[in-house]
Image (cartoon, grey):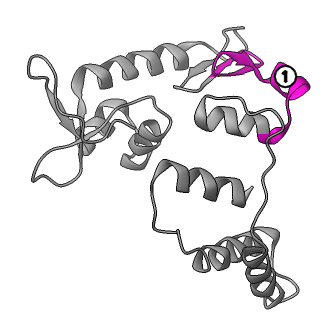
Amino acid sequence: MRDQVPPTGPAERRLSTKETAELLGVKPETVYAYVSRGQLGSRREPGGRGSTFDAAEVEALARRNRRESSAPAGSGAELSVRTRLTLIEGDRYYFRGVDATELAARHSFEEVAEWLWTGRLRPGAAFTAPEESVAVARRAVEALPEHASPTDRLRVAVIAAAAADPLRFDLSEDAVLGTARVLI
């Protein structure tokens, strides 16, 4: 996400979230999904509430969306989705330009995750969680009713582990990567 990036070059026309959603024909929540997937940049204006969007970028996304949705079903037109990290083209997935099947065949899950997060391949990468975090998470999950769903169990385990993490408010890159490794 390119939030709070100062403008460069000539003044660009900015759109509100509401205007962007209307132009794209989607809900405001979908606009933020586009931002999180890297398909649309946003910026907070000083003193303003909410995000604004570059009108030219929004119009380009709207044109792309119209082209993709105009192909009749079963026409053989292939869907292509591109983000900063991912390309989905036909039935192939690429991460950072490398075929996902090739990644899975040559590297462990942890090595691929590390590479996606940092751009650096760490051969032999292995993720572990501190015993205290695991113990806290287990106790919390054991307190749930027997019929609790796996999703509920995961949610409770993550919340309990987070409460025991002294670095939970540290948003530095190293701390966030460490938390991601522990969660996996």
What type is the residue that disc 1 sits on? Thr
The location of residue 72, given as percent across then percent down, is 62, 14
Of residues 136 and 57, the one drawn nearer to the viewer in this rendering: 136
**Residue shown at the point (23%, 51%) measured from the top left:** 50
Of residues 7 and 67, the one drawn nearer to the viewer in this rendering: 7
**Residue shown at the point (82%, 69%) measured from the top left:** 150
Q: Is residue 83 above or below residue 139?
A: above
Of residues 94 and 134, the one drawn nearer to the viewer in this rendering: 134
Image quadrant in which you'd find residue 21: top left
Q: Is residue 20 above or below residue 173?
A: above
The location of residue 43, given as percent across then percent down, is 25, 39
The location of residue 59, given as percent across then percent down, is 30, 20
The location of residue 111, given as percent across then percent down, is 77, 36
- Label 1, secondary structure: give it: helix
Q: Is residue 125 magenta?
A: no
Residue stretch in magenta: 87-110
Q: Is residue 51 above or below residue 141?
A: above
Query: Seen from this angle, which residue lies furthest top?
Result: 76
Image quadrant in which you'd find residue 10: top left
Location of the C terminus (image quadrant): bottom right
Location of the N terminus (image quadrant): top left
Left or right: residue 23 compared with residue 65: left
The local crowd at label 1, few if under 14, some if 14 to 19, many if 20 or more residues have their Cα within 10 Å, is few
**Residue shown at the point (66%, 79%) measured from the top left:** 160
**Residue shown at the point (46%, 32%) measured from the top left:** 38
Q: Which residue is mark 1?
A: 101
Left or right: residue 91 compared with residue 67: right
Of residues 78 and 141, the one drawn nearer to the viewer in this rendering: 141
Q: Is residue 95 magenta?
A: yes
Query: Seen from this angle, which residue lies furthest right?
Result: 105
Q: How many marks?
A: 1
Q: Is residue 95 above or below residue 114?
A: above
